[in-house]
Structure formats: C-alpha cells, structure tokens
Amino acid sequence: QVQPVESGGGLVQPGGSLRLSCAASGIIFSINTMGWYRQAPGEQRELVASITGGRTNYADSVKGRFIISRDNAKNTVFLQMNSLKPEDTAVYYCKLTAASHGGWRDYWGQGTQVTVSS
C-alpha cells in the first residue's frame, strides 16, 4: 500500500509564504503524476497544481504565486506558496498516481490545513 503524508501547513498572514511537503511511503514501483488539491469549507475539492515528469500545471488562481516541484529519489512533492491570500485558506491534499503491487492507482494524503489570516 502507498501512503502519502502531507506536512507544512499552518497559520500565516496575508502576503506570507508556506512550503508544503508530501512524502509517499510503502511499496512504490513508480510515480507518474503528483499533485496538490485544496478544499475550502462548503466548496468542492479543486486542483491547485500538478507535475508529471518535468511538466507542470497550475490553477489560474495560483499562477505566479505557487511553485510545485518533486524529488523523485525521495517520492516527495512540494508546494511553495508565496503571496498568500485569505482565499487560499483550505485543507490541502496531495494526490499521487503510483504503481504498487495492485497496479496503477491514485493515492490521497490525509490533508493539511492552511489558514491565511491577519
């Protein structure tokens, strides 16, 4: 089984920065896409950013402020969040598309809270 675990969330003032990490453990043969999603109260979960190989994709609302990166040797994906706004407040989840004993499937982390407030 593959288990992604997020860390790095917290409370930050508007304009501040946070760096999220998501490290995957377990039996992993390969990881294709790694991504970050977020869900605010009363809202649907939405894609924030994803990375497949060296190709990145960002939601329009975070372009120019957030940067996604990955360390393949450590099965880890990062999200550097700069110029944070109150509307970035949400629970952030990582999702990995990985190959394990059962073949390819998506794995979700448990989420980490990000709160942007003065």
Image: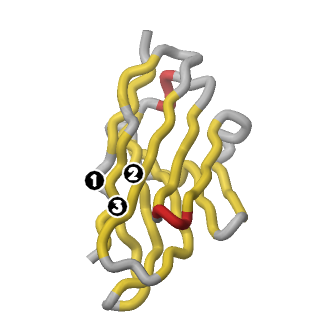
Query: Percent from the top left, x then y, of residue 78?
Result: 52, 48
What residue type is disc 3 on?
Pro
**Rendered-image quadrant of the N terminus:** bottom left
Sequence-first disc among 2 and 3: 3
Of the residues shown, which amino acid type is indicated by label 2?
Answer: Tyr
| Residue annotated with mark 1 | 110
Residue topped by disc 2: 93
The quadrant of the picture occupied by the C terminus is top left
**Marks 1/3: CA–CA distance:** 8 Å
Disc 2 versus disc 3: nearer the observer: 3
Residue found 42% across the figure and 55% down from its top? 94
The quarter of the displayed image where residue 107 is located: bottom left
Kindly state the secondary structure of the residue where label 2 is placed: strand
Sequence-wise, the earlier of marks 2 and 1 is 2
Residue contact at pointers 2 and 3, CB within 8 angstroms: no
Kind of element beneath mark 3:
strand
Report which quarter residue 12 is drawn in. Answer: top left
Q: Point out residue 87 in the picture as x, y percentages from the top left corner.
A: 50, 28
- Residue sitting nearer the eye, 74 or 79: 74
Q: With respect to residue 99, does 2 lie above or below? A: above
Give the vertical position of 5 relative to 87 (above or below).
Answer: below
In percent of the image, x 47 and y 74: which residue is there?
A: 97
The residue that disc 3 covers is: 4
Which residue ends up furthest to the bottom in the rendered image? 102
Q: Position of residue 79 (x, y in %)?
A: 54, 44
